[in-house]
Each structure stands twice: as structure tokens, then as C-alpha cells.
Amino acid sequence: MNERTGIGATAAIARFVSTLRSEDFPREAVERAKMIVADSFACILSGAGSEVAPTMLAYIDEAPGGAVPILGTTRRATPQLAALVNGTFAAALDYDDLMTPVHPSAVVVTALCSELGGGTVSGKRFLEAYIVGIEVGAKIASAIGRGHSGRGFHATATLCGFSSFAAIAYLKALSATQIEHGLGIVATNSGGLLCSLGTMAKPFHSGLAARLAVDAEALTRLGFTASPVALEAERGFFAAYGDENSDANLIEASLGRPWAVIDPGATLKRFPSCIAGHRAMAAVLDLKKLGATAGNVENIEVAVAPGALQPLMYPKPETGLQSKFSMQYAVAAALVDDRVGIVTFETDATQREAVKDVMSRIHAWEDPQQAVEDPVSANLSWGYRGYARVTATLKDGRVLRQRIDVPPGHPSNPLDWSDLGDKMRDCAASVGLPPEKAALAFEALRELDTLPDVNAVIDHLVKVE
Amino acid sequence: MNERTGIGATAAIARFVSTLRSEDFPREAVERAKMIVADSFACILSGAGSEVAPTMLAYIDEAPGGAVPILGTTRRATPQLAALVNGTFAAALDYDDLMTPVHPSAVVVTALCSELGGGTVSGKRFLEAYIVGIEVGAKIASAIGRGHSGRGFHATATLCGFSSFAAIAYLKALSATQIEHGLGIVATNSGGLLCSLGTMAKPFHSGLAARLAVDAEALTRLGFTASPVALEAERGFFAAYGDENSDANLIEASLGRPWAVIDPGATLKRFPSCIAGHRAMAAVLDLKKLGATAGNVENIEVAVAPGALQPLMYPKPETGLQSKFSMQYAVAAALVDDRVGIVTFETDATQREAVKDVMSRIHAWEDPQQAVEDPVSANLSWGYRGYARVTATLKDGRVLRQRIDVPPGHPSNPLDWSDLGDKMRDCAASVGLPPEKAALAFEALRELDTLPDVNAVIDHLVKVE
């Protein structure tokens, strides 16, 4: 119970979501959301070509029926199963956005896509619902704190169900009471362990969170009851999933102040790989402009902050999935490839001799000096702490240097619409979607805030039999 | 990693389940299982008439299709949705069995029912699978310890997914590797908060656990990967859901030693209400034999152990659901009703003047002396600590006394087949299933260990359009 207002966190969220009006959303929030949503659609699409796709498609083929499209395919499924599969696709390539500690956007967009049936939904309303979802999840994440992940929970799995349910609740104009029960359904179904990383269960977490939100809407609409105080209850979500620093009372005052979609905003990924390698890759792309090539490089030294190599555990990757978690591969591929994209991180690409040759001349290390320069660096996640300094020594003796502090795609170093267009084209190509369909989808997404019906976007992103 | 054998808990469970042969199951285990399974089928059936049924049936009607029957109805659904709904039904009346800290059997039976399609499954194999499921869940529960519930998790929700997946894994003869990944899927999807008690989400937990197991089988079969060390991993289930006393290493040596279905065994409920009132009700039934009647009782005093009234929070219940958690109502209804059954705890029944009249003359209290007599009593759950002592003073001055230490249905005071027959009849009647169908089902369940195909039981427990 919040001492200032006398209502609990669950009721506060329900009131926030149920009383928002279209004019409450700042123009900047809508503009930011438009770019993230476009990025999310590209990411969902790409999953249909990923290694988890055959299993997920076989899974829904066992339960035929339903009207909601699976992006990048000819399939349709029930809202719940479509959310599960589209949500899994969204995270399959590690290409979707980050808003630490979660990857929320593709989950929220996926859940919303399952709720578009039976009518038109304007692009503006879709964007507002997205903003609401991101907002609620971000503020729950802040209030439960880092101890949640520290305990072993994968926050994208455990928290994005709240995000996506809140988005649906706004889209469908649920009442405050319905939202309280819906949040209770989400809370009492939340799971997701960090030990699942590196397996299909990791992207599946995003699908589960999306499905949970769709389920919560259906059940709430049909009269289901759950705890209406599930976040803050004595034996509720914060008690079970948090630690002694978690405080559900922090949520209320933080909602919309500022909007999370603006501050801190989302990092949109330029490369389909672990964020921890992105700054070094960006540095290599700069060094190529200065004359570095695979042929003329004698060796490359990559210095990052203490801990920043932790997730990059494959110095000699054998598969596409491993290559996404390899600093050596990321740097070599950035030097060799004309364009770094989805193909760069596929298993075949890891076998290229030219890349292996460069990898053998790369030295990646963690520089303790970076911790001295910025003592709070260790509190940041892998891709943001310190900086990446890449030094290429050429065979002719020249030494080229570049230091990158902010990864490409970060809100302070954002992708632009042209970058997003490239990403959409890359994702569409990876699943064999005709380029003209991807182009039409992208055009619609650029103007999503004035689009009369967001279903038009979906129609462009599915295959026809 | 277990120091003695060098394998982890997840692998140990997988090995145990995948190497069991039919001859490994003691005769006594099969006999005990047969009775519990019969009881479970009755409980699942009864849920189709419960207050959660309209919502759950409307929910599956939104996703038509599937071949698995929903007991007590004419509906069919996909294996996943059938498990969700049958599982929810199983717990809807608080009539299903207990094996502290969980209500496992109806969840396991429900999940198994979703896996019977497309062939015959002998009753013997079904019983063995049930025994395996109960075994694995019970030993995980012991190893994670009481801190799990203490943190706010509803163990039926969070642990019975393991139980029901292990049962399916035995039934389907999954490989050890498949079982490891399946346990990983369950672990990374587990949820369920104690704050949901008293809402529809509580029985829903049983359905979710059953669905999770069915999902895990389907995904594992289709090639899905999850953490194969999910129980014991550094950021795995025990770390996230346990406390400092949790120890996954305890599991391996405890599997099958002794079989949980024999020791401690399950308590089958005689009455469809909170176990905490059962001993007092049994005492009243005895006092009736000594001459107590609603008409001749001046007052009734009920003394229970400290804490035993905690869940019985409705001295004057207004609804059927509240009446299940009322000592006053339970005692009065036991005195008034010729037979205590499902109808006893329906909303209409709570309005009876004869019952209200008796309730006004009941004094229920917690006797501190019981804690002195048995200092470890407080460690037991509500329905088992201490004893119930009922004293009825009659209008003619006689004083009748009865003390009950062990609730009816406890393994040391078990229901017999005649009791179970009554229960099946009562459950069938509550959903309008023809009595002759219930009788045929019950006959088949009595001989389940020699029944060629368990589908025959299911056929008797569904309605025809």
C-alpha cells in the first residue's frame, strides 16, 4: 500500500492504464515508439527463418485452427499460440531491442498482434498501447530491482508478461478491475530461468510472456478472478520474485514520469548478435574506412571493460548461435563482410577460411584501467560498461585506432530510418519474403501514427500459399 | 552435482524415470495408486459443475478443435487445453487429495489423460506412470524444502509440473536426454503465487501445471532444447525458487526410497472442504451416532490446535466457497446433513436456517494445551497438527465428547472403496452425469491394474450430446 495515495501497486497500475487518454502521450513518445515498433516487426519476421522455427511450427501444426498470422510464414493460429510463436520468433536471432534488464518490445508488439482480429485498430492506438506496455514493465523492473535477475530469473520472461498485458489492456480499454485481475493472472504464471540462455528456451521465454498476456486478456474478459493485489501482496510477486531491496510502492509515482520509451529509451540492435560485441564491431567498421582490410591487417587488439567479455564465451565458434557470442568472430566478420547482417551469423558463415584467418590474429582482453576510469561501470550490463578500443596494426606498419563508447542503436547514437529499412530488408530476405512486400510493410510502419489500420502492416509480412 | 554419483539432480531424475521397468513397482504401490487415481477421476469430474467451469469452457470454446475429452462435459480440446481445463476442474472444489505440500494426483492424472490419444494404454502402465509422477514431485518438494512455500510460491503450481511431466515421460518412454530437456522446459515455466488462494487462479494453478507437462512433452518430442541441468544450475530452479536450505543433491538418493505413494502416501478427502475442518466434522458424525441431533444440542465446543483455525476465516459464510473455509459451518452442516457432500458446500446450502441456528451455538477455539502436549505440532499443516476435540452439550444435560487425531482419508485412517464409490456418485450427480455411467467408470477403476485400456474409463466420464 502506497503511503501517499493509499492504494497498492496493482491498483495504481490499473488506474494508470485505464484512465490514460490519447492526448496524454507526448509526441516524442509516439515518434520513438514508431521506430522501435518498426524494428520489432523486422525482428519477429526474421525468426521464421531461425533454428527454432521448425520446432515451433511443428508445435502449432499439432493444434490447427485460428486466424492470427504467424509472420514470415503462411501459417495462422489461435491468438494464444500465435503470440507464443511470434514471440519466440522475435527473440530467436538476438536481434530485438534492449531496455535493460529486458527485451520488451518484440514481446509487446507480438502480444498486440494477437489482439487485432475482428476490426480495425489505428496505428496511433497501436503505438499508444505499445508505449503503455513498455512503461508498465519498465517501472515494475525498476521497483523489483537487480536482485530479481540476481536470483536467477530471466527478466524478459518474468516481467514482459506484465508489459504485454498492460499494452493489451490499453488497446482493449479494459476496466481497472479487469486490469487488476489480469495482472494477477500474469503474476501467478510468471517464470523463466537464466540457466535457459543458450537453448531454445531462451527465445521461447519471449513467446511465453506474450502468450500469457493474451491468455490473461481472454480469461479476464470471460470473468476469471485472480488476486487483485498480486504485485504487492504478502505472498505475491514482489515477495516471491524479488529481494529485500524490492519495493512495489515505487511503481506508482514513476508511471509516465518520465516515459520509459523516451528515457531511458530502447537500444535497437544494428547487428544480430550479442550486444557485448557491438561497439568493437562498430569500431572495426570505422577502421575499414581508414584503410583496414582483411588482407592488410597484421593483428587486431580489442580492449573492453572488465566483465564485458563474460557472455562472449566462444573464441572459436562452430555454429551460428555460438558465433553470436564470440568477440573474435564478431570483429573478424565485421572486417571481412561488406555488410554485417543475418547471413554473417549463420552456421555456414562461421566456416569461412577468410574469417578464421583474421580471427587467428585477434587479441581480445579486458582492460582493468577502464574500471579505474569509471568505477560505476561494473553496474552496467555487458554491452554498456566502459568502452571498446580497437587497434589494428597493418602489415605496412601503420597503426589504426578507434574507440567507441556508445553502441550503435543506443538512444544517444540511434539508428535512423535508413538503417531500419536495411534491417527490414535483411530480415525479409532471410525468410524468403518478397522484397516488395517488405518494402510496403516498411512504408506503412514509417507512417504508422497515421495509418488507419495496423492490420495492413501484418498483411504485408506474411507469405501467401 | 551429487558428490556420490557425479551426476546432477536433473540427470538423476532422467535416469531414474527412463530406466524403470514395470517389475520395479511394488504391488503395494500399485494398490495405493489405484485408489488415489479413482479418487482423482471423481474430483476432475466434479469440477465441470463448479463455479470456475463456465469461464474455463468459454475459454476453450474460443479455440475449438482437438480430440481430448473434458470430463463431465461433451467438449473436446487439444491436449494442452484439455490438460489446462481438466486440471483446473480437478482442484475446483478443494476435494482432491493432499500430499503435503502439494495436491499432486489430480494434476498428474489430468496430464496423463491428455496423452492417451491414438492408441491403447493399459491401466497398469497408467498407474505406474502416476506413481513415477508423484515420486519425482515429492522428492523435489522435499529437497527444495518449506522455504519454497515460505517465499510465497504455491507448490501445487510450481512443483506439480515436474510431477506430471515425469509421469508423461514414463508413459511415453522418453529417453533420458529428452527428460532432461523436458524438466528444463518445466523449470523455466514454473509459476504460482499463494496470494492467488481464494480466487479462480488457485484451481487454475493445477491446470497450468498439467498443461505445462503436456507442452513439455510435445516440445521435447519436436526437438526443442532447454537447460539440461535446470534444477541444480547456478541460475536454475533451486537457486531461484528455493532458499538457503534447499539442496537439489538430496533428490537422487531419495527416488523410490521409499516410494512416496506408500510413505507418506496421500490423504483422500472425505469432505469437499478445507482439510482443517475435517477432524471436527468426523467427530460430529460420531457424536450423531451417540444421539446428538440438531434439535437436541444446546451447544457445541470445538477445540483444535494453535493455528488450526487460520485458514477457516469465515465464521458466517455467505457463499459456497466461503463455507469450505468455515469451522462453524462445517460442524453445523455435519450435524444437520444426513450425508455431507458437494451439495453441503454450495451457496444455497449456506442459507439454510437449520444450519445457521446450529452455527449460533458453536464455539470454536484454539487450545494452547495442544501445543504443550505436542511441541512439533506447529510444523504440521493446518489439518494435521494436534487433534480436534468436540464436546456437545445436549438440552437434556448429557455431555457427549469425541476426539479425532487423524483426519478421515489419511493413509493411516484411509477411505475404502465403498467411500470412494460414494464420492464418485456424488461427483457424477453434481455435474448431471448419468449414475450408470459413473458406476461403470468406478467398476473399471477398481480393476484398473488389469484394465486393457484406460480410455474405457474416460469414455464413461464424458457426456454425449
Image (tube, coloured by chain):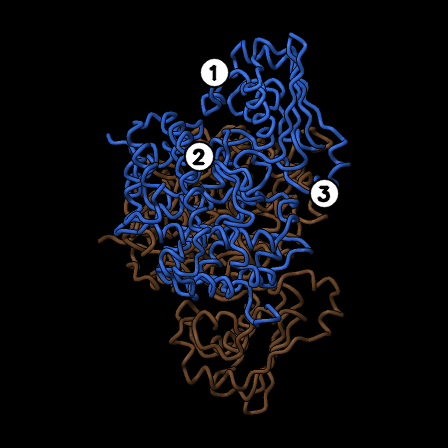
Chain colours: A brown, B blue
Circle 3 crowding by C-alpha within 10 Å: few under 14, some 14–19, many from 20: few
Query: In whole angstroms, how far apart are the C-alphas of marks 1 and 2?
Result: 26 Å
Are discs 1 and 2 both within one chain? no
Q: Report the amino acid beneath label 2.
A: Leu
Mark 3 and mark 1 lie on one chain; the one further toward the N terminus is: 1
Query: In whole angstroms, how far apart are the C-alphas of marks 3 and 2?
Result: 42 Å
The residue positioned farthest toward the bottom in the image shown: A396
Visible in this render: residue B313?
yes
Instruction: Name the residue beneath numbered marker 3.
Output: B376
Report the quarter where the N terminus of chain B lies.
bottom right
Output the chain of dot 2: A
Residue B207 point in image, percent of width and height:
44, 41
Residue at 69 percent of width and 75 percent of height: A367
Output the chain of dot 1: B
Residues at discs 3 and 2 in contact (Cβ within 8 Å): no
Are discs 3 and 1 both within one chain? yes
Q: Report the amino acid beneath label 3.
A: Val
Query: Secondary structure under badge 1?
Result: helix
Q: Nearer the viewer, residue B214 or A280?
A: B214
Q: Report the amino acid beneath label 1.
A: Asp
Query: Secondary structure under badge 3?
Result: loop
Instruction: Name the residue beneath numbered marker 2.
Output: A219
Q: Which mark is residue A92?
A: none
Instruction: Name the residue beneath numbered marker 1.
Output: B348
Rendered image quadrant of residue A151 = bottom right
Output the chain of dot 3: B
Give the answer, above or below, for where A450 lies relative to B434.
Answer: below
Residue B97 point in image, percent of width and height:
50, 39
Q: Is residue B166 left or right of residue B82?
A: right
Query: In whole angstroms, how far apart are the C-alphas of marks 3 and 1?
Result: 40 Å
Residue B255 point in image, percent of width and height:
53, 59
